[in-house]
Amino acid sequence: MTYMPPPPPAKPRNNLRTILIVVGIVLVLCCGGAVAGGFFLFRTVSDAMGPAQASAKAYTDAIVAENYPAAYGHLCAKVRNEMSQAAFADAIKKTFDVESYSVTGTNVTTMNGRTTATVTLRATLSDGTTRTQIYPMVQEDGSWKVCQ
């Protein structure tokens, strides 16, 4: 009988390396999911707030440009029924002398199937003072209207 050397010992499995690879893959998937979820949440929120903001900006732009008929058209039916266009223009001329403005906040709420919004502006008046203007808004006929 001839002497046969014993077979070489089996290489130990590198379990730590396998565990680290699996943990790395899980972390990448979780981070990717979080980024995708954040993106879709941002899009949903901006889609809800964007039209209300745009309507408030159009209303304010019309006032700044002294285009009172256009601004009056951005008012809800309730306000238009309570005030004529001429009375509206007179009231705005006396109280709203805006040089510039910026939107500082928007809140859209749906309660009992009724969607409302509040858009907050920071307005700089012609005398240099600033004031916060809050526009309560409602949806009428598929568009946002200022209803103050």
Image (spheres, rainbow, N blue to C red):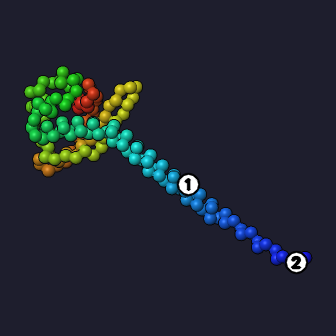
- Above or below — where is 100 with respect to 91? below
Nearer the observer: mark 2 or 1; the answer is: 2
Q: Quadrant of residue 94?
A: top left
Of residues 122 and 145, which is closer to you in this image?
A: 145
- Above or below — where is 27 with respect to 111? below
Question: The residue under label 2 is which amino acid type?
Answer: Thr
Can residue 120 be seen from the camera position used here? Answer: yes
Residue 2 image offset from top left, x and y in percent: 87, 78
Residue 133 image offset from top left, x and y in percent: 23, 40
Residue 70 image offset from top left, x and y in percent: 13, 32
- Above or below — where is 126 with respect to 93? below
Q: Residue at 40% of width from left, 25% of height from top?
A: 112
Say few, some or many: other residues with alpha carbon within 10 Å of mark 1 (under 14 / 14 to 19 / 20 or more).
few
What residue is pinned by disc 1? 26
Q: Residue at 16% of width from left, 29% of height from top?
A: 73
Question: The residue under label 1 is which amino acid type?
Answer: Val
Residue furthest to the front in view is 1
What residue is pinned by disc 2? 2
Quadrant showing the C terminus: top left
Q: Residue at 33% of width from left, 39% of height from top?
A: 47
Q: Is residue 91 left or right of residue 1?
A: left
Query: Please, what secondary structure does the residue beneath circle 2 have?
Result: loop
